[in-house]
Each structure stands twice: as C-alpha cells, then as structure tokens.
Image: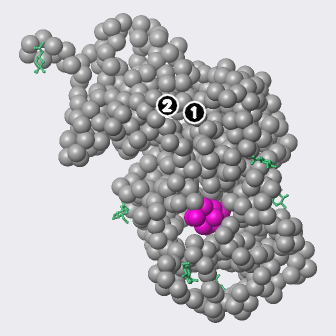
Amino acid sequence: MVTLASRRFAVAIFAIAAGLVLQVHAEKQWWQTTTVYQIWPRSFKDSDGDGIGDLNGITSKLEHLNDMGVETIWISPIFKSPQVDTGYDVSDYLDIDPMYGTLEDFDNLVARAKELGIKVILDYVPNHTSSEHEWFKLSENSVDPYTDYYVWHEGVLDANGTRRPPNNWLSVFNSGSAWEWSDKRQAYYLHQFAVSQVDFDLRNELVIEETKKIISYWLDRGVAGLRIDALPHIYEDAELRDEPISGLPVPPTDYGYLDHIYTKHLIENYELVRIWRDHFDEYNSKTTDGLERVMFTEGYGTTAQTTLYYDYGAHIPFNFLFISNSTVSYNAETQSPAEIKHNIEQWLQSMPEGATPNWVIGNHDNMRMATRFGSEKVDTFNFILLLLPGVMTVYNGDEIGMTDTYLTWEQTADPQACNTDPGRYQGYTRDPQRTPFQWDNSTSAGFSTNTRVYLKVNENYRTLNLAAQKAADKSYYKNFQAASRLRNTTVGRDGDLKTVVIGEDVFAMSRELDGHDPLLVVINWSKSPVTVSLDEFSNFSEKLQVLASDVNNDLKVGDTVSRDSVTLQGNAALILTSSDITCSDYSDVSEVACLIPSLKSFFNV
Ligand SMILES: *[C@@H]1O[C@H](CO)[C@@H](O)[C@H](O)[C@H]1NC(C)=O
Ligand SMILES: *[C@@H]1O[C@H](CO)[C@@H](O)[C@H](O)[C@H]1NC(C)=O
Ligand SMILES: *[C@@H]1O[C@H](CO)[C@@H](O)[C@H](O)[C@H]1NC(C)=O
Ligand SMILES: *[C@@H]1O[C@H](CO)[C@@H](O)[C@H](O)[C@H]1NC(C)=O
Ligand SMILES: *[C@@H]1O[C@H](CO)[C@@H](O)[C@H](O)[C@H]1NC(C)=O
Ligand SMILES: *[C@@H]1O[C@H](CO)[C@@H](O)[C@H](O)[C@H]1NC(C)=O
Ligand SMILES: CC(=O)N[C@H]1CO[C@H](CO)[C@@H](O)[C@@H]1O
Ligand SMILES: [Ca+2]
Ligand SMILES: [Ca+2]
C-alpha cells in the first residue's frame, strides 16, 4: 500500500516531468476510457404498462444506447426492496425486485448487452439493509450468527430512569436520531439513512464475508463491475463518541446540525475498499475471458478524501468536482473558464500516478445538469467531459438536456425531503431529477403506455424528447453522439491533455498525440465581444475545421476558422481539428479525419 506522503511525492515528480501537459498514453483496459451511462431503472422505460420502469424496458433500449456511444451502463439498485429509498434499502441482495422483473429478465439483459459490447455495472449498497431483510429479522431475535450483523446498543439510562440512545448521532435523512429502538431486541439499532435502512456492523468478519459473496454472485451472473454506494458512511467511531455541533442554522434534527467527525470518512472505510479490491483481483485472476472486473466507489468528500480511495484499490472513485467540491455546489453561479480548468487540474494533481481520471456530470442525487448550468450549457459540458481523458459518467436524460421537474409537497416521494416540511422540502428533494425519461411526444413521453407513472412526467416532454432530437439536424443528442464518436478515436483515448483559459471568457482544451489527428474544444462564456487567438495550440494547422458545434451555432461540420482569430458567439461550444488532415494519411479507422464524412451525414450537411 502506498502511503499518503510517498504518493504526494510521486505526484510532484510526475507534475514536474510532465509540465502542464498530462501524458495519458499507455495500454488501456476497457474501463479506463469507457462512457458510463447511469440508468435510474424506475423511470427509464416501462415495458409492461404498470407505470414503473423495468429490466425488459432497459433491454429494449440497449441498441439505442449503443448507437449513442455508450459502452457501459450502471443500473441503480434493482434488488428486492420495500422501496422506502428507491431501492437503496435492500431486503435481498441476490434477487431482483418483482416490480423490475426477474433474475431471468436480468440474465436476458446481460446477454443482449454482451452481444452489443455493452458492459453492465450494478449498484451495491453495503452500508445497510432494509429492516425487512431476513438477516435483520434474525438479528433482532438474536439468532446466531446474525446477532451481531448490525450495530446494536442497549442505550443509556438518565438519572430519572429514562432510556435514551447512546449518543447524539443524526440520520442523513433529517429524521432526528440515527438510533431506533427495537422492542423485540430491547436495544437501539443504528441507521445512518432512513429508519428502515439498518447499518451493518462491518467490524464483524462474518459480515465482510457476506459482502464478498454478494460481489461474487453478481460477477458470476455476468456483470463487469459494481458501483459501491455511500462509502463514507460505512464505519462509525467504535467508542460511539458524541459529535460536535456544527453551528449551521438548521433545526437540531437536521443532519447538518452536527459536524460528522465520528460517523463519516473513517480510515476503516478505506481499509474495507482494500479488502474488496483484493477480492476483485482474486476473482479476476481466476477468470479466463480476459475481462477485468472493476469497482467504482461513491464517496462525497474533499478531493483528498475521494482520491484516497484510488490508493486503497478503487478502480474509479467517482469525481464529483463538476457537481460540488464538498463545500460549494458547482453551478451557473460558480462556473467560469478558470473554475473549469481548476476543477480538471485539481483532480489530475490529486490522484495517484497511473490512476485513471474520471468525471461525473450528474446523478440521481443532484439537480440535473441543464438545470444547474442552464440549458445553453448542455453542449458545453458534454463536449468537455466526453473529450477529457478517462471515464465519463452521464446520468440518463442529461444527454438530451432534460431539466428538473417541479413537484408539489404532495407529489414528493423522497424520504430525505418527506422528513422535512412543506416549507423546506424543495431544498432536500431528489425527485425532480428522477422523473421519467422523455423518449417522444406520445403518452407519458413514451416512457409508459400508462398515464399514471411513478413520478409525473415533465411538461416540457412534447418538445424536449429523444425522438425530436434524433429528427432534428442538430440537437444535444446528436452533439453527444458526435462527441462520443470523437472520444472513440486514438487521440480521444490516448491523447495528452492541455487546458488553457484565454482572457477571462474562453476555455480551450486539446488532446494531442504524435502521429495522430488532434482535437480541440473551445468554449465561450463571454458577454462582451472579444476575438481570440488559439495560437497557443501551435501544433494545429493555421486553418481549423469544425467537427461539432453547439445547437445555437451556425458553424457546420467542415467549416473552417482561422487559428489566430476566431470569433465565437455567446455560449459557443466547438470541437475543432486541423484542416490539413485526411483519412488516407492513416490506415487506422479510429482517426478523427476518418470520421468526418460520417459526422457530415449525421448533421445533414
Ligand atoms: C469505437 O470504434 C470502433 C472502431 O474503431 C467500433 O468498433 C466501436 O463500435 C466504437 N464504439 C463506440 C461505442 O462507438
Ligand atoms: C428525564 O431526564 C431527561 C434529562 O436527563 C429529560 O430529557 C427527560 O425529559 C426526563 N424524563 C422524564 C420522564 O422526566
Ligand atoms: C470550493 O470552492 C470554493 C469556491 O471556489 C472555494 O472557496 C473553496 O475553498 C473550495 N473548497 C474546496 C474544499 O476545494
Ligand atoms: C410528435 O412527434 C412526431 C415524431 O417525432 C412528429 O412527427 C409530430 O409532429 C409530433 N407531434 C406534436 C404534436 O408535436
Ligand atoms: C506539439 O508537438 C510537439 C512535437 O511533436 C510535442 O513535443 C508537444 O508535446 C506537442 N504539444 C502538445 C500540447 O501536445
Ligand atoms: C462570446 O459571446 C459573446 C456574447 O454573445 C460575444 O459578444 C463575444 O464576442 C463572444 N466571444 C468570442 C471570443 O467570440
Ligand atoms: C449518490 C448516491 O448514490 N447516493 C446514495 C447514497 O446512499 C443513500 C442511502 O443508501 C441513497 O439514498 C443515495 O441515493
Ligand atoms: Ca413496468
Ligand atoms: Ca455505517
């Protein structure tokens, strides 16, 4: 294991040797350059008209995902669950919830995905089970070996004989104490999330063995990896010490009331990731198909806290810097070319040498990308993230610029919001980003034949939908597809990265590799007119040709601009390359120039 100190040293040397250019050329495994598409199964596609998305619905859309350029899908929890927290409360890790289908449906999905070359990743929730899980029922009745599978405590008695929880810990979901009394067991159990999401005691070796069995079970069923949920919350202080008050102006039952020094980011969480990585490695060493199975980890924290998961064996610890930097949410107010550059560099400089970078633009826990940044920035962020080196994770619907849906207090289902009140729920609810996928302008946006669906469809579906964007000459979707094609080239996979801020308003980044066609992304944030020179990118020819442009831009594939004087309209987002390149220079089809004819037909030019 690399220590933090020696790692920083290695990074420093790397930074000096590489100058400002990140060298990323090396032999790569499938997962190091993949695009991960996060599917929220409940609202993706309903195949049987019950108003709830399901596995057969996902299977029916795999071909479409392939066409879009997606190589990996990550499906949020589909396991048996009472659905108190949309499946993040699992009652059987080894079975599929009937509302999503059956194990057979799942096997069909994996088989079809394999035919199309799509990898499947599942969500694994190791922190807690639903209180309806068989293990919890047995634990509550003190049946061995399950007695100590969860965190139990008999509580403490006040002077007047009243019993209360052992400490002041609070639930993440703002419901007050993280401890709940069980009459059966005559003890409190810990729940960092909802009352019915019971925290495991992962200091118990038997529980760790169970986690390994669950991982192997799904790998055996053909998944290419697991995304591990809520890592920072796995271990809590063994001495159960009270947490200090944060001083934030929130009610004392809100999670933010305390400073979580004893229930979050404990070093034991990282040590558990190491145990799992060893398990993955052992599994991989026994397989003969050459497919490396991998572990993605979810842990919101400072960049140092998150990148430390790499050192402990996570293949990809999700990078949320395009969502927030753990203190400040990154949105239309905080964005600027300088911040973009800073975000990119912060991650690259914090991750250990040789690690695979990754970038997340949205997920089911945060406002949609188009709502956070404004619809006019959809192409901007898709171009940047798709053409950065490493893994990009996109949340379903962001590729067509879906926006958050307003839901009333009565329509709200998310426990994190329902535990607050009608005056405050909007600040906590995660439902607006979870409404049905907008496939077309038919009933329920083509998501379901049923007019009654899990969360109401956004009213903008009549114009904002995939079918319309496929039919248009230019659209967010077509731009996503084009950028995905360009990402899937030698330079997109292996090119060195250079990022530049020009003046205050323009962000530009290149991917370059000796002997291969280069790529250049240029973005304009400006409100006041400036014409910029891109001469800093001196390896490009003096005339640059357009490969893709934002939906409001008049520039078309094949149009040329002068490198020393480019005028960009408001919110412009362009992907450019040298104009002197031709496909015949190379025999390799994965060169940018070889894609130009297909990009032209793509945009009908
Ligand atoms: C990437 O390009 C190769 C050809 O170089 C092609 O076979 C493959 O389907 C492409 N993948 C995607 C996701 O577009
Ligand atoms: C017992 O004492 C505690 C404070 O130590 C107080 O919060 C609680 O309300 C008391 N209960 C009763 C029944 O008096
Ligand atoms: C997050 O960003 C804000 C605004 O740019 C900055 O003040 C703060 O220091 C950053 N925090 C971290 C942990 O990087
Ligand atoms: C619905 O979509 C179809 C196909 O995309 C289109 O032909 C039709 O005009 C649309 N109808 C309305 C009312 O927008
Ligand atoms: C430009 O080309 C030179 C010579 O091939 C190379 O050394 C340099 O790294 C390239 N610049 C970038 C930003 O990749
Ligand atoms: C960026 O957009 C603004 C607003 O439309 C425009 O005035 C400005 O000229 C553009 N900047 C560049 C560098 O083209
Ligand atoms: C980003 C993410 O997946 N967050 C999840 C963390 O865990 C809680 C409880 O399992 C979920 O509610 C969140 O959605
Ligand atoms: Ca269904
Ligand atoms: Ca825990």
Pick the front one: 327 or 276: 327
Q: Position of residue 220 (x, y in %)?
A: 72, 31
The residue pinned by badge 2 equals 411
Q: Position of residue 228 (x, y in %)?
A: 54, 39
- State if disc 2 and disc 1 touch (CB < 8 Å): yes
Segment colored magenta: 376-388
Tag 2's secondary structure?
Answer: loop
**In whole angstroms, how far apart are the C-alphas of marks 1 and 2?**
8 Å
Where is the C terminus found, in terms of image quarters? bottom right
Name the colouring of the figure.
Answer: one colour
Q: Quadrant of residue 25?
A: bottom right
- Type of residue at label 2? Gln
Can residue 233 be seen?
yes
Q: Position of residue 315 (x, y in %)?
A: 59, 50
Residue at 27% in and 32% down: 253
Pick the front one: 402 or 32: 402
Of labels 1 and 2, earlier in sequence is 2
Pick the front one: 272 or 596: 596
